[in-house]
Amino acid sequence: MNDGAPLLALRDVNTYYGQIHILSDISMEVQPGELVCLLGGNASGKSTTLKTILGIVEPRSGVVEFDGVDVTDRSTSYRISQGMAIVPENRRLFAPMTVLENLEIGAYLRDDDPSADLDYVYELFPVLAERNRQLAGTLSGGEQQMVAMGRALMTKPKLLLMDEPSMGLSPILVEQSFEIIQRVHATGVSVLVVEQNANMALSIADHGYVLATGRIVLADTAAALSEDEDLKKAYLGR
């Protein structure tokens, strides 16, 4: 238990690739039960922030805390075992495997019976129940996104990390995807959405952060950010 502490906290994080300073003094939080969005354009540092949260890259300075524990030096597998789950950009499914097999991979590290969670995933995504024997690589982009989200949910996450969930989807499927994120969040799962689509992300988030050239340039409630004039010009196209 985190006893009132943020579920996820980055404190003065500086991340480098070689000698190139990518993230500069990044501080951000996700409270238990909160839906937070991290916004920014290409090369803003969103992907590096996500990799730092997951432990794929290690910051040169600063602290990453998860569920009240300093995980800065801990492995990605440790963080996953403690309750982080990622829905990666472009889904990254095992295309030659069935929908069911992809979902079961999400429960691979669990030592309990995942059948109730599989039923929950099928309740969220009825089409996956209908196509559970179909090869994942033959699904549409929207259906593949459902499998990727379902696979992450099979880990019973405390924090669901969404990397560009609108990427490559039609506007209708983007709306459906964000509706599903809201439904998952409503069950009590904390969510961090890393997105370029600021309008959609802010429409469902509680709080938001805006990255530009590796720095947090704006941080506020989603409602306040939606009305921020600089953000409107830079990201919201109005």
Image: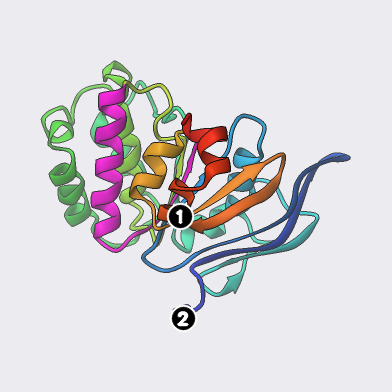
Which x, y percent locates residue 126?
Answer: 12, 37
Alpha carbon separation for disc pair 1 and 2: 24 Å
Residue toward you, 125 or 199: 199
Kindly identify which residue carries mark 2: 4
Q: Residue furthest bottom?
A: 3
SS class, disc 1: helix
- Image spot of residue 44 (x, y percent): 66, 37
How many numbered discs?
A: 2
Q: Is residue 167 above or below residue 151?
A: above
Q: Which residue is mark 1?
A: 224
The answer to whether residue 39 is seen in the rendering is no
**Kind of element beneath mark 2:** loop
Of residues 138 and 192, the one nearer the viewer is 192
Q: Is there any visible trace of residue 163 in the rendered image?
A: yes
Tell me, yes or no, whether the two marked residues, 1 and 2, touch with CB atoms within 8 Å.
no
Q: Give me the residue at 62% from left, 44% from top.
A: 211
Q: Which disc number belongs to residue 179?
A: none
Q: What residue appears at the point 25 percent right and 25 percent down from the top-left corner?
A: 172
Magenta stretch in the rendered image: 171-195
Closest to the camera, between mark 1 and mark 2, is 1
- Quadrant of the image occupied by residue 97: top left
The correct choice, above or below, for 84 with respect to 213 in the image is: below
Q: Residues within 10 Å of mark 1 (few under 14, many from 20)?
A: few
The amino acid on which the numbered mark 2 sits, given as a three-letter code, is Gly
Which quadrant is home to the N terminus? Answer: bottom left
Residue type, mark 1 in image: Ala
- Which residue lies most toward the top here? 138
Q: Is residue 122 left or right of residue 152?
A: left
